[in-house]
Amino acid sequence: MRKLLPLIGTPSGSHPGGRSAMTCRFRCGDACFHEVPNTSSNEYVGDVIAGALSRRSMMRAAAVVTVAAAGAGAVGVAGAPSAQAAPVAGKGQGHGSAPKGARGLRFTPVAPNTEDAVVVPEGYRQDVVIRWGEPILRGAPAFDPEKQTAKAQAGQFGYNNDFLALLPLHGERGRQLLVANHEYTDEVLMFRGYDPENPTREQVEIAWAAHGLSAVVVEEDRRSGRLTPVPRHHLNRRVTATTEFRLTGPAAGSDLVKTSADRTGTKVLGTLNNCSGGTTPWGTTLHGEENFNQYFANSSRATDKRYGVGTGATERKWERFDKRFDVAQEPNEVHRFGYVVELDPYDPTSTPRKHTLLGRFKHEAATVRLTQDGRPVVYTGDDERFDYFYKFVGSKRMKRGSSRSVREHNLSLLDEGTLYVAKLTGDSPATDIDGSGKLPADGEFDGSGRWIPLVTATADGAVSHVEGMTAEEVCVFTRLAGDKVGATKMDRPEDIEPSPHTGKVYVALTNNSNRGKSGYAGPDEANPRSSNKHGHVLELTERFNRPESTTFAWSLFLVAGDPEDPSTYFAGFPKDAVSPISCPDNVAFDDHGNLWLSTDGNALGNHDGLFGVATKGDRRGELKQFLTVPNGAETCGPVIQDRRVLVAVQHPGEIDGASVEKPASTWPDGPGKIVRPAVVAVWRADGRDIGV
Ligand code: FEO
Ligand code: CA
Ligand code: CA
Ligand code: CA
């Protein structure tokens, strides 16, 4: 049984949440220190939805329909069974009496801690799968941080791994295809003697090559359970800040995205700040371009201000080395970032795409569910305080098969359909929501909601549903479209994931230090805590459980924090039997229907971690910590297979004042070795399934 920890303050002084100043500086361009970009006045209104169903009638409706659509979404990709892990020869570390819990969560929870290590439950083993700098392409040299070059980095695994996908590889026994995002670079932890005022061209070009995506085949050692990269495999690929992308959807080819280097407005170089993502049922991966604003300098436009693009120089000074990062010189380049990008990892020669129909904002993730007739529905959140979450409903049906023409068809699925933004209404009187987190009189933070259409694209063109904005403008200035239609201001919508078992959709809302402060939106039933330090998780039920519905019911599934804090809520589960959790960020499901949550910025003073929680049955709400990550790191990209858990350990050692010379972590290779972001696999020592 876990030990309850005293509530302690933020470890990093004035920095919001538990993040160090270095994280704020390099990851999001100090977003929390700048003004909140959403200054629109679309306040929460009590009960404005004419004709919306009451939550209870929706729940009744949802209960009687099948979840066939959710099941159809699996198609053996997102929920692919793991490659087999053979039992460890000769021994199995005993568990003693088997820990209790929902099936899939029967492990002894890891206690909150500040170890400079990945800590896993008793009876589990772990190993690094791949680190920043490991060569994956033919000709790439072994990693040498003292002699790093842009050319070497372009053939090596990138920096700061975030989203992960593990895809099946048919015909190659024991192998899977790992796809990873590389969100951003920490120059002070990458380069000895880094001078932030005077980065060199070589350092900047290394950073360009360390951003982007990696695809790398991994192979299982059947005896030990380890996963190791297969260098030089023909599917291995690096996508960087200079790889060619195709812009698709209504904004492609419009004047808003034409630049001096691309008069067609269809060809973009690179992807930036890819945070979380998703795996599609048609065998591709989606990657959210998140804090793209921080790479662009010298803007004075109001539209850029709504995205947090700054008026001066950038932290990394890229604008000195390529004028496209200088808005004053190349005004439209910044309009070509902030999209959901799609990669076909099975075709290393394919040109990845940026889908403008899914809107432009700080995309955290993009996750797919299929309608009963096979059309894609994509959920995606905008990770900023007081910003919105969105849904895309496609109009074209997915085709099955793997021929080139089928794959080409499926790669166009996100270019026709409608983009919506969420509007939530609570069902309790506003006076019941006092900002303390106290449950309202009806015992639940809950209500109904509506998906408000923003833009629809067909083969014949696109129409805007937002007064005063063209379809192209909605796709490029999507935040402004959300403002105009009165979308609900949320506490930083991070990852979103529909349950493959029930179809219910889970939205991680990581925190919002400014909620309820003077000049900002106050608490509402969907974001009920003022100065929300620890975040919450919203559960959304589409009407009739149809993903294409335009109305839904919602309730708060978790209100995070130390369970001793009366403002927390764990779906009604007894609070003396759950782990403390703070700042939920990435979410994933296991095959048992349990939700797994990784955290970013534990504001309880302990390290970030990965947690599992039951979403149904009599253990619904029982939350258990599965692992913790080293000093300064965030836990990202969880993939939960039957016999293996994969996490991305992002920005280890990212603590104020740290540098290559003065590391704040010795992970993963011990003292004297450079700190390296890396992917870690965890499996059971006895080779059996996780948590059973
Ligand atoms: Fe890159 Fe919203 O975390
Ligand atoms: Ca209520
Ligand atoms: Ca994140
Ligand atoms: Ca995330």
Image (cartoon, rainbow, N blue to C red):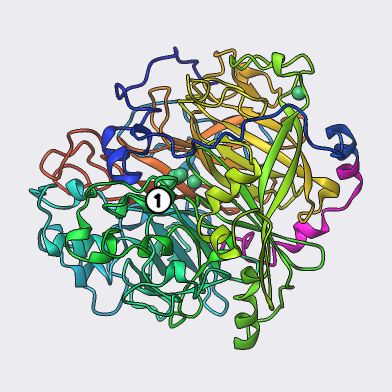
Q: Which residues are magenta?
A: 61-84
Q: Total number of numbered labels? A: 1
Q: Quadrant of residue 25?
A: top left
The structure residue drawn at horizontal position 77% and vertical position 47%, both measured from the top left corner, is: 502
The structure residue drawn at horizontal position 79% and vertical position 37%, both measured from the top left corner, is: 49
Read off the residue under disc 1.
304
Given residues 554 and 121, the one toward you in this image is: 554
Where is residue 181? Give x, y as percent. Answer: 41, 58
Say whether residue 499 is magenta. no
- Please say if 108 is above or below 260: above
Given residues 658 and 236, the one toward you in this image is: 658
Residue 224 in view (yes/no) = yes
Given residues 190 and 327, the one toward you in this image is: 327
- Please say if 598 is above or below 144: above
- Is disc 1's CB within 8 Å of ligand 1? no
Where is residue 64? Give x, y as percent. Answer: 92, 46
Where is residue 430? Give x, y as percent. Answer: 71, 19
User: Could you tell me the amino acid type at mark 1?
Assistant: Asp
- Please say if 124 is above or below 339: above
The quarter of the picture where the N terminus appears is: top right
Given residues 103 and 469, the one toward you in this image is: 469
Q: Secondary structure at mark 1?
A: helix
Where is residue 326? Give x, y as percent. Answer: 26, 59
